[in-house]
Amino acid sequence: MTSIDVQDLTKEYGTTRAVDALTFSVRPGRVTGFLGPNGAGKSTTMRLVLGLDRPTSGTATVGGRSYATLEDPLRHVGALLDAQAAHGSRTAHSHLLALAVSNRLPERRVDEVLEEAGLASVAGRRIKTFSLGMRQRLGIAAALLGDPGVVMLDEPSNGLDPEGIIWIRELMRRLAREGRTVLVSSHLMNETATFADHLVVLGRGRLLTDTSMREFIEAHSRPRVRVRTTDPAALRGVLSGKGHTLGEADDGRWTVDGARAEEIGAIAAAAGIPVLELADEEASLEQAYLALTADETEFAATAPASSAAPTSRQEA
């Protein structure tokens, strides 16, 4: 089994502890979203896994081995940390070819990943002429070059257009279905919710949660039911007798906090009240994430001190 295992991992830079006794595992066969506010330690942790930094204490291994001991590492681990790292004067093809030769990979893989990343038509162009989205695709192509069992991507959707976002989303899902270990760091909560099966959330270098997407949202949201009926007065009365309050939603529907649809449906049916719509509501990933990390954000904006009318002064 190829997994990423982090055990009691700590990294200090002078007096700053970027990663604090961190322990978690990333398992094959699922996409693990790696979340946390700015400064939470996500990028530092990924660098430690890839041997780009040395831990102060603890271990970070891939398949039970440190990255530095892997022969032909691109065959085992593919990573995208910085899409701007490729030398601008090289062509896309020559950049990938250099990586392939240094890891004893067949040259045909260069053409295969360029095709998969949608860059075959620009393979001969210099990287310095690429847009951010094209550089991002090239970085992902490099991560796939060795057909690795472990893939680590830091903000893979950065700079991609809508088609590119759909492509990377489907790519990550496919890699997981093939039994690979996929770790994806992202700040885009709504996007993460479309591809992640599991979540590891950090705050100030510490582990806040390591759980499935479903369990995470359920743990950080209060049950709520949305209901539409032709007789709201009758429903309000019967629900009040059961200890529930019927509140009006912004869209004209009605809501019941602290309840489940099954319970409200049974109460309405027993009273003979017609129900046109009935559904459970739950917090979005973004809402659940903000609820968990509210006290862990290192850099947070504050509301204006007053609501004074703006002046005509322009920012330089």
Image: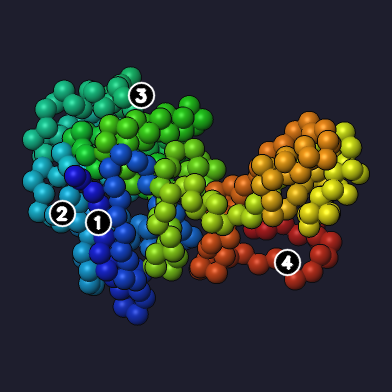
For label 4, the residue is: 304
Q: Earlier in the sequence, mark 3 or mark 4?
A: 3
Q: Residue furthest bottom?
A: 15
- Name the N-terminal-most of marks 3 and 1: 1
Residue 202 visible in rendering: yes
The type of residue carrying mark 1 is Asp
Query: Which residue is denoted by mark 3 in the rendering?
Result: 118
The relative height of residue 56 versus residue 178 in the rendered view (above or below) is: below
Dot 2 or dot 4, earlier in sequence: 2
Task: Name the residue located 49 percent from the left edge and 53 percent from the top edge.
Answer: 216
Labels 2 and 1 touching (C-beta < 8 A): yes
On the rendered structure, is 257 left or right of 162? Answer: right
Q: Earlier in the sequence, mark 1 or mark 4?
A: 1
Residue 64's disc is 2
Q: Position of residue 68 (x, y in %)?
A: 13, 55
Residue type, mark 2 in image: Gly
Q: CA distance from mark 2 to mark 1?
A: 7 Å
Between marks 2 and 4, how big is the CA–CA gap? Answer: 50 Å
Local SS, label 4 = loop
Amino acid found under the numbered disc labelled 4: Pro
- Give the labeled residue for mark 1: 5
Distance (Cα) linking label 2 and label 3: 34 Å
In the picture provided, is 203 more to the left or to the right than 110? right
Q: Give how far across and how far down residue 247 sits, in percent.
A: 82, 50
Other-residue count near label 1 (Cα within 10 Å), few / some / many at <14 / 14–19 / ≥20: many
Residue beneath the point at 46% across and 33% down:
165
